[in-house]
Image: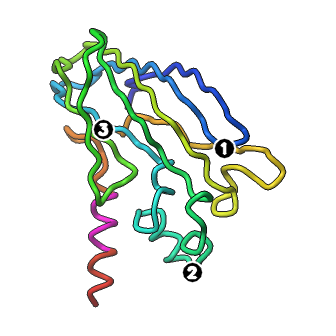
Amino acid sequence: MLAQHHSKMNVEVDVDTKTLYVTQELTYKNETLDTLKNIVLNDWINGYSSKSTALAARFSDEFDRSFHLAKEKERGAMSNLIISDKKNNSVPWARNNNFQDLISFELNEEILPNQTALFSISYTIKIPSDKFTKYGYDDKGKMYLKNFFLSVARWENKDFNYLEIVLWMLLQTCMKNV
């Protein structure tokens, strides 16, 4: 698989509120033979946003109750998302309630094979405590960041590859019903 995109970011850090203000320029090159009508972004930080996300279920599966007992201020989240295309037109986006760590946005103009598209993205990240995964803020005021910024989901088999997440969620639902 070839690299299909790259990002440039400007990030303002507010240490007191444990918040990042991000402006991200995403350049996406369609190196597939398919015409793209939407793009899916990984939003891993939003997995920390509630006790009902796939990440929360993972903690529960590992018998780690710290996330479920955590105060809201200790959990992370992404908010204030604005996506614009190269013409500065707003791009509508959606988040499926079952997949809080994925964002899908419909393109104002399709991206043809070998065509490149540019998007401006701005958002706010609330950094979680590092007590859940060792990434986030610690009690000494330091921040350890990994996979906290938006990234494009992998394109595979003519679609953005989030099938493994769907299958995992289905498996979790089936196991609860046994």
Q: Amino acid at mark 3?
A: Val
- Horizontal placement of 39 versus 100: left or right? left
Q: Position of residue 85 (x, y in %)?
A: 29, 17
The reply to whether dot 1 and dot 3 touch (C-beta < 8 Å) is no
* First to last magenta residue range: 165-171
Q: Nearer the viewer, mark 1 or mark 3?
A: 1
Q: Position of residue 126 (x, y in %)?
A: 57, 45
Q: Nearer the viewer, mark 1 or mark 2?
A: 1
Q: What residue would you read off at disc 3?
A: 40
Q: Quadrant of the N terminus?
A: top left
Q: Secondary structure at mark 3?
A: strand
Q: Amino acid at mark 1?
A: Lys
- Residue placed furthest toward the right: 140
Q: Position of residue 88 (x, y in %)?
A: 30, 12
Going 78% across and 44% down the picture, which residue do you hit? Answer: 142
Q: Quadrant of the C terminus?
A: bottom left
Display coloring: rainbow
Marks 1 and 2, how far apart at CA: 27 Å
Q: What residue would you read off at disc 2?
A: 63
Marks 3 and 2, how far apart at CA: 31 Å
Give the mark, 1 or 2, whose residue is nearer the N terminus: 1
Q: Is residue 27 above or below residue 1?
A: above
Q: Secondary structure at mark 1?
A: loop
Predominant secondary structure in magenta?
helix
Going 28% across and 60% down the picture, which residue do you hit? Answer: 166
Going 53% across and 28% down the picture, which residue do you hit? Answer: 22
Say which quarter of the image contains residue 41: top left
Q: Is residue 173 above or below residue 26?
A: below
Q: Amino acid at mark 2?
A: Phe
Q: What residue would you read off at disc 1?
A: 18
Residue 63 in the magenta stretch? The answer is no
The reply to whether dot 3 and dot 2 touch (C-beta < 8 Å) is no
